């Protein structure tokens, strides 16, 4: 069997790695001149800084890291919140904690109603109740304190405002277990030398990676799939697509309709060297979910240097970066200089007008009969631990069908 993987982010590289382990002939296409996607690590004088994926809760990912001999650590991450005046505030007021605990219990009971919808690894059939924006869903069930808890998690990691993100996506990403983990401050898993080290380890086993090669056409011809670029074309038994492609690249009505409807959120990351030594991860409560506004920052300290990485919605431009810098200085941070700024487009999803109860179910049914398959964050929540399980399941199923 001959397989093409389009997109060399974590999902694509993992898929190719798992296939090559089984002796499958794999070709990876990546339109950028580097691999890794959101797994991007900056290194300078023995200081490593993540510019994309930061951490994982998943214990499943440990198995992969051990297999690849990639060192990792698990550690607590302390967080604080500041208001519009840059003063420290509580995430949830102390007198609201009993209400929060009651609401968590109520939410757990409510979500049991939607177990069939929410328990699957990949997106699938959606209960119509979960098509509502999250804020409306929580308000409907009088879970007002819980809204304060979830809002920073959604917006800070690029999933949007609680008023824009459908309850379905929110609860697939932040299920009860994950919410409890954040509230309790459970240990998080960090890769010692950064997520780029994981991508490098995966790439060392893959024979055919084609860099700066953008796919222009994917088409089924006589039960095989033609993949065409500006420089030629090849034919494959299976094509696995991990990233949003421009409209009309895939010559399949259903898949192409998905590509036309998928939205992503523009997300901007800025890395600064700062003089402060005592900083912790900090959320800007007044900005949460707002475009062109600083959502939060996290800090790494290595080799007597402090590097601070900010996360904000919006597009890379001077005005936005100046606004982020001003917010940092107003917070009492002594900024030495900007190291880099990186634009991401994250969280592939359908907006409220396009998401329907059967949309992902229709995609799932097509996957069973088509030699073109969508994997990764196109069909599953974009958290690295979850993607590991989702992609592994997809490859296992593909290999079972081949046998």
Image (cartoon, helix red, strand yellow):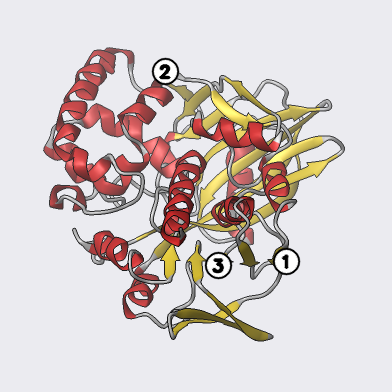
* Res. 291 visible in picture: no
Q: Residue at x 34, y 30 (%)?
A: 149
Of the image marks 2 and 3, the number of the one nearer the N terminus: 3
Q: Residues within 10 Å of mark 1 (few under 14, many from 20)?
A: few
Report the residue marked by disc 2.
184
* Res. 190 visible in picture: yes
The nearer-to-camera label among 1 and 2 is 1
| Image coords of residue 101 (percent x, y) | 25, 17
* Element marked by disc 1: loop
**CA–CA distance in space, label 2 to label 3:** 47 Å
Residue nearer the viewer, 194 or 49: 194
The nearer-to-camera label among 3 and 1 is 3
* Element marked by disc 3: loop
Q: Is residue 266 left or right of residue 286?
A: right
Q: Quadrant of residue 223?
A: bottom left
Q: Are marks 2 and 3 in contact (CB under 8 Å)?
A: no
| Image coords of residue 165 (percent x, y) | 31, 50
The nearer-to-camera label among 2 and 3 is 3
**CA–CA distance in space, label 3 to label 1:** 27 Å
Q: Is residue 1 left or right of residue 103?
A: right
Q: Residue at x 62, y 84 (%)?
A: 233
Report the residue marked by disc 1.
33
Q: Are marks 3 and 1 in contact (CB under 8 Å)?
A: no
Q: Is residue 367 left or right of residue 213?
A: left
| Image coords of residue 136 (percent x, y) | 18, 45
**CA–CA distance in space, label 1 to label 2:** 40 Å
The quadrant of the rendering that contains the N terminus is bottom right
Residue nearer the viewer, 293 or 226: 226
Report the residue marked by disc 3.
1
| Image coords of residue 228 (percent x, y) | 58, 83
Q: Residues within 10 Å of mark 3 (few under 14, many from 20)?
A: few
Q: Which mark, residue 87?
A: none
């Amino acid at each position: 069997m001959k397989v093409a993987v389009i997109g060399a982010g974590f999902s694509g590289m993992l898929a190719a790695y798992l296939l090559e382990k089984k002796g499958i002939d794999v070709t990876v296409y990546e339109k950028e001149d580097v691999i890794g996607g959101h797994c991007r690590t900056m290194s300078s004088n023995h200081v490593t800084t993540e510019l994309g994926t930061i951490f994982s809760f998943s214990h499943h990912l440990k198995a992969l890291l051990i297999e690849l001999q990639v060192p990792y650590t698990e550690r607590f991450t302390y967080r604080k919140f500041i208001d519009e005046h840059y003063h420290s505030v509580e995430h949830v007021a102390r007198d609201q904690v009993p209400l929060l605990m009651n609401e968590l219990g109520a939410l757990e009971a409510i979500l049991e109603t939607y177990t069939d919808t929410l328990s699957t690894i990949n997106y699938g059939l959606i209960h119509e109740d979960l098509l509502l924006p999250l804020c409306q869903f929580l308000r409907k069930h009088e879970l007002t304190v819980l809204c304060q808890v979830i809002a920073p998690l959604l917006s800070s990691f690029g999933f949007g405002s609680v008023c824009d993100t459908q309850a379905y996506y929110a609860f697939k990403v932040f299920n009860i277990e994950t919410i409890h983990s954040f509230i309790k401050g459970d240990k998080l898993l960090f890769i010692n030398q950064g997520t780029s080290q994981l991508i490098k380890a995966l790439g060392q086993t893959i024979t055919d990676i084609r860099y700066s090669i953008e796919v222009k056409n994917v088409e089924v011809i006589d039960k095989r799939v033609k993949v065409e670029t500006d420089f030629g074309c090849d034919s494959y038994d299976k094509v696995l697509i991990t990233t949003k492609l421009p409209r009309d690249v895939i010559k399949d009505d259903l898949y192409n309709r998905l590509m036309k409807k998928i939205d992503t959120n523009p997300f901007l990351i800025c890395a600064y060297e700062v003089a402060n030594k005592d900083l912790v991860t900090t959320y800007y409560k007044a900005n949460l979910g707002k475009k062109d506004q600083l959502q939060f920052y996290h800090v790494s300290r290595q080799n007597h240097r402090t590097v601070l990485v900010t996360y904000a919605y919006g597009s890379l431009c001077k005005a936005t970066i100046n606004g982020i810098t001003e917010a940092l200085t107003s917070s009492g941070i002594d900024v030495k200089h900007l190291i880099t700024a990186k634009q991401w487009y994250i969280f592939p999803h359908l907006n409220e007008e396009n998401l329907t109860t059967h949309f992902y179910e229709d995609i799932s049914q097509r996957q069973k009969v088509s030699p073109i398959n969508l994997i990764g964050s196109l069909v599953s929540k974009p958290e690295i631990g979850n993607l590991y399980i989702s992609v592994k399941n997809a490859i296992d199923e593909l290999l079972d069908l081949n046998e």
